[in-house]
Amino acid sequence: MTALGTAVVGATVSKRRETAFAWARSHRGVERELDDVPLSVLRGALPRELVGTLFRCGPGRLSAHGTNYHHLFDGDGHVCRFEFTSDGVVRFRNRFVRTREFLAERDAKRALFRSFGTNKPGGIRRNAFDPVFKNAANTSAFAHEGRLYALWEAGLPHRMDPATLDTLARDTFGGRLLDGENAWTRIAGRELPFTAHPRVDPKSREMFAFGLSNGPTQRLHLYRADGSHAMDEPEVHKLDALYFVHDFALTARFRVLFLCPARFDVVRTMLGLATPVSGMTYEPARPTRIWLVPRDGYAKSPIVIDAPSCFVFHHVNAWDHADGTVRCHALRIDTYPELPHPFDTDTLSIAPSKKSVPFYTEFVIDPEARTVRAQRRFESPCELPFVDPSLTTQEHRFSWATATDPASPMQVFTRLVKFDRARGTETVREFAPGFPGEPVFVPRGDGGRGDDGWLLAMGYSTRDGASVLEVCDADTLENVCTLALPVTVPPGFHGCWVR
Ligand SMILES: [Fe+2]
């Protein structure tokens, strides 16, 4: 553990290769589904106060039925459940999400659907004029008021049983997530997209979410459900151009959305000559359009403010400042980042373009003056940020993320970093040639007490040759306990903790 600025021994070239191969190994594909297997402790000891359940979601395999997926985002959704019991044991269960597409392809023993980055085998003949893409259910395990969902941003949420991980429903929220009948939806289907990053107001327990639907016109759908899962009629906004939005932030007043300028080659995609990913280009000549949408409804128009062009995958947090501005912290990238395939070890072991490295940035947005000011706050290139969810809509001091060496960034993030806004410091722990996934913060007690608690990060230990769950002290990042998984599981994207 090292304060940034003091010596952190960077990964050597051989370690970079070792890390790239470890990343590829971790993505070999989940081979077994297990039921509540106790995990063995490799190092350290489990804290007895750590009682609850961690859920993680990610692509569980990168090929199926003889078809290799060309992009990480295409892997079939897979959810892990780690139950921390009061007797000091962690029980592990894992399941692929039984989406309609997963089951149909399993029965047919061949690929039946297009994905974001992979067309069906058979070329143009099988892909042209097919606007239906597989719901991969592979991005986030998200819990809200007793319900668990596997989320994928371009389709409906899948509701899972939080105890068994059985797939229960392709959830339309009582029909609210079904589009109207028209010529386009008769071909493409009526299911509306639902982000992998809903936000919950910790006071009201309301869940806010959005979806970005493509078609003749790109539309932004805004959702709100109360603590009993009742969803309002969605707000729908037609957009003036094409944008990419993966995440958003929530304050007491606003939903904060960064509409990042992108272009999709709709014609080549519809002809089956490209996929949405291969046909997407970032358009730096256009501004990034920031939308502040009042939480209290359609009656009030969004406040639209243009910022210099940038790309944001993930927001850290946001709140309404006493001076009337909105403070939104996000991981800013100059352009759409490179995302090499996990098996492309050569590209993974080289440094990414400086333009595609994300940095922790504070955006000060003035809704009255319609201005925005951005300032980088920390120097570690980082992704997959996490803040105590009980501080959503409120100013936070601490946040955590996966990170890479600023002097020699690589495509696989091998570090955990803790950001302390009050001190302006970064605390770093290096795992190379292994790597950690998203650090889920679990506060001791009820939360809201700063950095007192633990980080849970699923990753891969090269030393142990196994997927592991790292339990770290959230203050110092020191190892508390390392648990071995009985199957190799890709680290995935996002998860949550349920007490
Ligand atoms: Fe995400």
Image: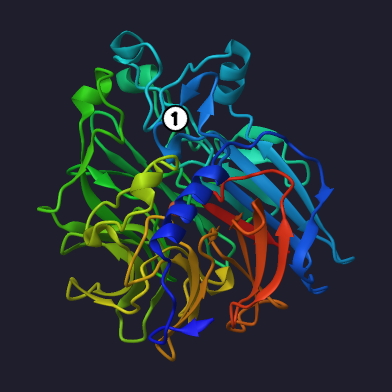
Vertical side of 383 occupied by 478: above or below: below
Residue 488: image x %, image y %?
A: 65, 44
Q: Which residue is mark 1?
A: 69
Q: Is 426 left, or right, of 361 in this rendering?
A: right
Residue found at the very far front of the displayed protein = 14
Residue 136: image x %, image y %?
A: 51, 34
Residue at 82% x, 47% y is 37
Observer able to see residue 432: yes
Vertical side of 446 occupied by 205: above or below: above
Quarter of the rendering containing residue 368: bottom left
Residue found at the very far left of the displayed protein = 285
Vertical side of 184 occupied by 257: above or below: below
Residue at 24% x, 57% y is 353
Quarter of the rendering containing residue 132: top left
Residue at 47% x, 21% y is 67
Residue 98: image x %, image y %?
A: 64, 29
Q: Amino acid at mark 1?
A: Tyr
Q: Is 220 left, or right, of 135 in this rendering?
A: left
Residue at 36% x, 32% y is 117
